[in-house]
Image (cartoon, rainbow, N blue to C red):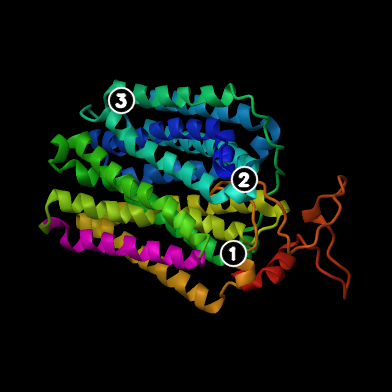
Amino acid sequence: MPLSPSMSDTRNVIVLIIAVMILQIAGGLISVLTPLGLEAMGTPPQAIGLIAALYAAGFMLGAWLAPRALATFGHIRLFAAASAMNAVSVLSLSLVHDAMFWAPLRMVMGVTLAFSFTSIESWLGSAVPDKSRGNVMGIYHTGAKLSLMVGPFFVAGLSPLDTRAYTWAALFLSLALVPVCLTRKEQPPVPERRSMPLKSLYQLAPAAVLGALIAGTVNTGTQSLLPIYFEGFEIGGGGTAAAAIASAAAWAGGLLLQWPAGRLSDRIERRLVIAGLGGMSALAALFIAIFGTRLSEVSVIVALGFWGAGALSFYSLCVAHAIDRTPKVLIPQVMSGLLFVWAVGSIVGPLLSGFAMRADGETGLFGLAGLLLIVLTVVMVMRVRSKPVAIEDKLAEWSPVLPTPLASVKLDPRMSERPADPAQDPAEEAAPEDGGEEAPDSPAAIEDGAESKV
């Protein structure tokens, strides 16, 4: 029986999806081990938040360097080198139990993880055709969230400073190399090295930029301290087991809603879907903040699942919204820019959450998350009311690009095409003479040509 086009397109990139799933098992492990390990060393919450911010700073640096590194080394070699360095860094954490030693290693891990995701996700973005974007994107994110949910259970019951726990993480980081290095699929062309100014990125898709910033702030800030809050629970035996259950509940919520939300956003205004996800997550966070101490542990875990369903699903829709407005020549720069904005939020988030948790425990941690998610909801509704999307723009065909730092798509059929000049970069063409037309790929032309979509 012949495969459907979407299934065939998924099969063509299944090796890359499997590699990311293996990588994310390690990511789930490390996300639980790091804060619990630091706490076991006697590190105060503010310092734990600071180290999480250093990891985010490394990720931001990696997002900024990734286009140049990818253009220099190619997808496979960059992914292999980054995964190997990440595995070495994880093993090094188990050798010296000192927060001052862990801080720079976490920054290195942020850089290498950004390189890994840039390599794989830009490859996915260029390999999947237009008609299958929603399905393949849903499968990719569902698989990644499933791995993040499963990962912490490999260390359930172990001490957060047990060497075996870090060996598990390094094992999966190394194993992720195998499918990528042995694939027979041809690598996509390397991208341009240049980046887009943040001002131009904001002019192109302000809702996407604000959404990415709030996603980085809320998700990284809350998740960096989540294991510490739930370590005191008795569910599953407490300790790392309770933290693993809490992490799994949050990712399970995102796992269940990621694909339906993405498919729904293909049919109605994406920003309204983002607003709905933000509102649901805000209510769940405020519910935990206000009633958490009076509820059973199971009730708090269920509420955390609702929080994850919204908070861990809307970032990809913000990126999809930006893709809807971006022509081919600027896709890599836009994706790198959004990842950079997300990383900025990831630096600020753990610091804010650390101070909030110190000030008022779980009330401060989830109260802060709830307030920021309310801001997200209000911003998205206001953007829709002020700049509605035209029906013909909403239904235009776009290439499949995942929420990635780099990708490649076809030009919007509504924008005029020009013959490529290999001696000249389209994004660097001279400004038009007075009375002439804007270059179709210039930031000004993009803003004018897509105004109805912002």
What is the residue that sits farthest to the bottom in this orientation?
386
Quote the CA–CA distance across marks 1 and 3: 42 Å
**Relative vertical location of residue 407 with respect to residue 431 in this rendering, above or below:** above
- Residue 360: x and y, percent? 21, 58
**Would you say 359 lies left or right of 96 here?**
left
Region rendered in magenta: 268-293
* Kind of residue at disc 3: Ala
Q: Main secondary structure of the magenta part?
A: helix
* Closer to us: 52 or 194: 194
Q: Which is closer to the viewer, label 3 or label 2? A: 2
- Residue 366: x and y, percent? 27, 58
**Relative vertical location of residue 41 with respect to residue 213 in this rendering, above or below:** above
Asked which quadrant contains residue 236, the reply is top left
* Closer to us: 56 or 311: 311
Residue under pointer 3:
165
Residue under pointer 2:
406
**Would you say 278 lies left or right of 327 here?**
left
- Residue 211: x and y, percent? 48, 61
Residue in the picture at 64% in, 24% down: 184
**Relative vertical location of residue 188 with respect to residue 198 in this rendering, above or below:** above
The label on residue 205 is 1
